[in-house]
Image (cartoon, grey):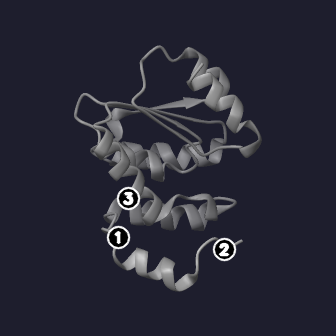
């Protein structure tokens, strides 16, 4: 399903800052290796998430739904050196791709990948969050929201 006219999407893409070589490789590997590769955030969403984190001055971010790690790495770019991003997922194949690129990125040390059910992972967090990005199983969005903001 297309949400945006293709001409508008092309315009936005052309006028969005490049994501860099690492994220370009990550997106390609996502399409080559994983099921449902269209779920990758990609350049436009990734740069937008980074901008949001920058504008908020976020130091603590939670992401529900890691997939291959594109959005986590995008947001981690905006974090200060002492910033932290927790990201939750339970798909072992996607987690393997994410871990590979987290290890390659200079921002990967800011990321903690929480493997398993997201609601269980959220329940274990004790830090105050500055930002949350929910991009997981749509049927649980309200549950995730309520777990993050009780």
Q: Nearer the viewer, residue 48 or 31?
A: 48
**Residue at x 35% of width, y 59% of height:** 22
CA gap between label 3 and label 1 equals 7 Å
Q: Earlier in the sequence, mark 3 or mark 1?
A: 1
Q: Is residue 54 above or below residue 19?
A: above
Q: Residues within 10 Å of mark 1 (few under 14, many from 20)?
A: some
Q: Nearer the viewer, residue 111 or 103?
A: 111
Query: Mark 1 = which residue?
Result: 16
CA gap between label 1 and label 2 equals 19 Å
The quadrant the N terminus occupies is: bottom right
Q: Does the residue at mark 3 contact the one at mark 1 (Cβ under 8 Å)?
A: yes
Q: Is residue 116 visible?
A: no
**Residue at x 57% of width, y 25% of height:** 148
Q: Is residue 133 above or below residue 84?
A: below
Query: Mark 3 = which residue?
Result: 47
Helix, strand or loop for disc 2:
loop
Q: Is 90 on the left-hand or right-hand side of 105?
A: right
Residue 138 occupies quadrant: top right
Query: Mark 2 = which residue?
Result: 2
Q: Is 128 on the left-hand or right-hand side of 41?
A: left
Helix, strand or loop for disc 1:
loop
Helix, strand or loop for disc 3:
helix
- Residue 118 image position (x, y, % from top left): 64, 30
Residue 143 occupies quadrant: top right
Residue furthest left in the image: 81
The quadrant the C terminus occupies is: top right
- Residue 124 image position (x, y, % from top left): 56, 15
Q: Is 90 on the left-hand or right-hand side of 74?
A: right
Q: Earlier in the sequence, mark 3 or mark 2?
A: 2
Q: Is residue 120 above or below residue 16?
A: above
CA gap between label 3 and label 2 equals 20 Å
């Amino acid at each position: 399903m297309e949400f945006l006219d293709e001409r508008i999407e092309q315009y936005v893409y052309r006028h969005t800052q490049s994501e860099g070589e690492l994220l370009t490789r990550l997106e390609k590997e996502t399409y080559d290796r994983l099921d449902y590769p269209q779920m990758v955030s990609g350049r436009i969403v990734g740069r937008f998430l980074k901008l949001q984190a920058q504008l908020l001055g976020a130091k603590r971010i939670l992401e529900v739904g890691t997939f291959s790690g594109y959005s986590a790495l995008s947001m981690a770019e905006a974090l200060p050196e002492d910033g932290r991003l927790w990201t939750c997922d339970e798909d072992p194949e996607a987690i393997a791709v994410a871990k590979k690129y987290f290890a390659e990125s200079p921002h990967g040390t800011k990321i903690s990948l929480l493997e398993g059910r997201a609601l269980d992972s959220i329940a274990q967090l004790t830090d105050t969050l500055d930002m949350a990005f929910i991009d997981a199983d749509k049927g649980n969005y309200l549950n995730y929201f309520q777990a993050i903001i009780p």
